Image: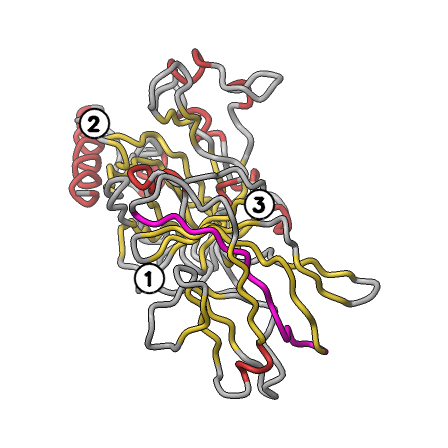
Amino acid sequence: MKTQFKLTALAVATLALTACGGSSSDDDNAAQKPTDTIYGPFNTGTTSEPASVYFDLETMAVVTESADWDISFRRTDVFLNNTDSDNPVKAYFTGNNADFYDADSKAVADKFANATPETELADFEAVTAASIPADDMFVADVAEKILDGFYSYNPTTHQVSAADDKYFIVSSDDSYSKYRVSSLTQAGFAMSAVTFAIANQSASDAAFATSETQLVVDLAAECANDATVYVDFDTAMVVASTDAWDVSLACNADKTGTGFEISLATDATAIQDFTNSYDSITASHHFGYGFKANEYTDPAFKANPWYAYGVNGGHTLWSQYGVYIIKTDIADYKLQITSYYNDDGASGNYSFRAERLDD
């Protein structure tokens, strides 16, 4: 569909030049560069069945995940390719349209409601190669692990202790388990024992159990026989790898314990409830909690979101028409998201402007 759009735009431009008696020289073609070209809409699925769209800025085309993509879209999230950790794709927000927010950082409804791709084209065109900041102003996506944060490190004593007020909620096997690491012991550079305080909410329960089950795991003893320790929260037991399990801890080489890392099973997801806010999880609203896999990406776009939610009531996402500069290993590009909806009003359908910034 993008190719068809570009051909149509080119045909229109050609007709316009012919009608005006325009020249076909390279200089004249450059002067007629269609900066108002909009790519999309590209469908990113539904809330219950999200899908990712991968886009290559060099070719201005949708590509597969295995290809050399630069930016991707998945429902409300925008991601940058950080596969090459030494040279990840990065973004810089130009800060245009600051007047879309008031002094209290609240969205100004009229600004969002009255903005259109046409009214905001000037902002996009105003960003040129001269707008590209120093490299240290760009930000990349950061790879994170959802179960990190269960311990505290003292840089003076070099000792690790349990962050026993940090809760995690795991979704697995049609049930939810809320847990915290209530204590741990350190032996050299290893974690030799850990205690999980667990409260379960089965499919038939309306809330988490009011009392916690304490599961003490002697990691040094478990590691004497196995390379990995597996824990099932439903039964509050250490289990075999062939059993149903929720989290695992990898033993170190000398079998004295594990590293200071807890990993989530591939068929499970989790959220961090560090403020202990949830007494229950409503299964029908599961996708609204933001459950994540063991490893996930904290996007650079999160610091400067492209949208505001429900600025005049309702559940609509409104683009602030922010202009971002995207730095790849090929070049710098500018990008402006113009819509999250298709012509039928269905959400998750991205349209945007994108253009290379040449010196």
Which circle's residue, 1 or 2, is located before the other in the chain?
Answer: 2
Q: Residues within 10 Å of mark 3 (few under 14, many from 20)?
A: some
Residue 238, image x and y in percent?
46, 72
Q: Secondary structure at mark 1?
A: loop
- Quadrant showing the N terminus: top left
Q: Which residue is mark 1?
A: 267
Q: Nearer the viewer, mark 1 or mark 2?
A: 1
User: Magenta stretch containing residue 173, yes or no?
Assistant: no
Front residue (pair 315, 340): 315
Q: Is residue 129 shown above or below 136? A: above
Q: Residues within 10 Å of mark 2 (few under 14, many from 20)?
A: few
Front residue (pair 62, 230): 230
**Majority SS type along the magenta span:** strand
The residue at the far top in this view is 110
Residue 227, image x and y in percent?
49, 83
The residue at the far right in this view is 156
Q: Residue at x 50, y 50 (%)?
A: 298
Q: Residue at x 58, y 40 (%)?
A: 275
Q: Residue at x 35, y 30 (%)?
A: 338
Q: Which residue is mark 3?
A: 274
